[in-house]
Image (cartoon, rainbow, N blue to C red):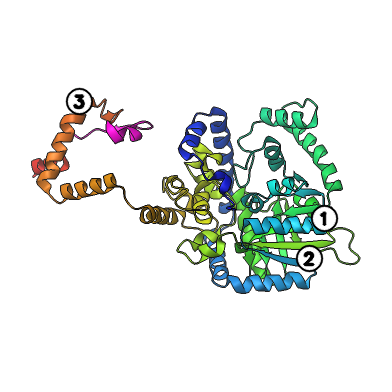
Amino acid sequence: MNSYAQHEHHDFLNAVRQALADPPLQAALVRLTSTLMAGNRRGYAALADIDALRDHAKLIKEHTLAYLDRYLEQLEMSVQKQGGHVHWASDAEEARQIVLGIARQTNSRRIVKSKSMTSEEIHLNPALEAAGLEVTETDFGEFIIQLAGERPSHLVAPAVHHTRESIARILSKYSGETLPDEAQALAQAGRRLLRQKFAQADMGISGVNFAVAETGTIVLISNEGNARLTTTCPRIHVALMGIEKVLPRWGDLPVFLKLLARAATGQALSVYTTLITGPRRRGETDGPEEFHLVLLDNGRSRVLATPFRESLQCIRCGACLNACPVYRRIGGHAYGGVYSGPIGSILTPLYDSVVDNPHLPHASSLCGACQAACPVKINIPHMLIGLRELQTHQRGKSRWEKLTYHLAAAVLQRPWLYRLGLRCARLVLRPLAHEGWLRHLPGPGTAWTEARDFPAPAPRSFREQWRQLR
């Protein structure tokens, strides 16, 4: 089963219209992204050598991807040496079956999860629930959208599209009590509802921010502390990791710890940085009895062999979403896939299908703000242009598109025909202009003027003005 199957027929343009017509969503997006983007700038500015640090992080990622097979095998051996188990999943279905198999073998019925975009990518929760298991998201934002039956709309703030009022309604319905729409009261209610879940859970499932091949250590970064409860209270811990998250050496980790929180929220360091190396050892009082690491491919090795391999350097900080003028207007759900924003416009077509996601590579102004914000300086605009080119080659040109290009070539190769075309455009369009702008274009031009004005033809062309000046 394709991991993106449920979004196969997503209507991007209609979703964009709905997002643009939703004032509360617009206000929430501006508020969140402005706050996070300002934090990103402050966090970067606090380090004198930030450019050198970002360049160094990029070099580490480039080196790791060049020798990915070697470091993944080293990670497997290191984890096994520490008493953990390693499972390899080629696609989403295999990953789901591995987790289900572990649950059955360990007689796990109640599961708690910390925030994991990788588990969203493979649609893990529906598979576990269909097998009769109780699954609870423990990140507060993820808990809200789980109760609402929705997907995350941001990599860092999954419930950004919700207000205090809507959160109060969701929690009141779930808890059976009327809760006020006050932040402190809602947070206390969430804590009360989730604490009992940690105590009752048989299995904890987490993502992986980074994994160190040298030591077999996985790294979890969070601000709420739920990740630590997820990985210490239950007797079984399953960590789900995209294969690109591996780092070669212990000494590489501080580079990314300095960058991730600064890029995501502007913090010098997240509130909780958890390092886990294998299951609980003899004499230790907490931690799981068993530790399982699931290494997920799901299209990543295929991307590795393409010009788009740079996308695998992403550390899921969300900085490019906050900086993107398109995401700031339409939010995450409009993109249709699990990953949204500029990086989602690359990952979803690459992991899923370029042909089935025709609008995503075009959901960008190519302004470069995403690359400027990215902690590892991923050249997102360049890859979006590459995907557009790939789309053109895969689908070919329609008859009308070919005719348009032939007509344009004929006009541009003949100066007299170009001048005649300008005169005709001026004659037809200038009477329709208002203060130098056309509010409505005829024919195919209506798609442009539905959302913006079009500049009217100038009274005189550049050539005419140049001739007069001479």
The residue singled out by tag 2 in the image is 278
Magenta residues (range)? 442-460
Tag 2–tag 3 contact (CB < 8 Å): no
The CA distance from mark 2 to mark 3 is 75 Å
Q: Tell me if 138 is positioned left or right of 389 in this view.
A: right
Residue 467 lies, in percent from the top left, at 9, 43
- Disc 1 secondary structure class: helix
Residue 450's tag is none
Residue 282 lies, in percent from the top left, at 90, 67
Label 2 Cα neighbours within 10 Å, binned few <14 / some 14-19 / many ≥20: many
Q: Can residue 134 be seen by looking at this rendering? A: yes
The CA distance from mark 2 to mark 1 is 12 Å
The residue singled out by tag 3 in the image is 431
Amino acid tagged 3 = Pro
The CA distance from mark 1 to mark 3 is 73 Å
Q: Earlier in the sequence, mark 1 or mark 3?
A: 1
Residue 457 lies, in percent from the top left, at 21, 35
User: Which one is in front, 275 or 145?
Assistant: 145
Q: Tell me if 380 is positioned left or right of 106 in this view.
A: left
Q: Residue at x 51, y 58 (%)?
A: 311
Q: Tell me if 3 is positioned left or right of 306 in this view.
A: right
The residue singled out by tag 1 in the image is 232
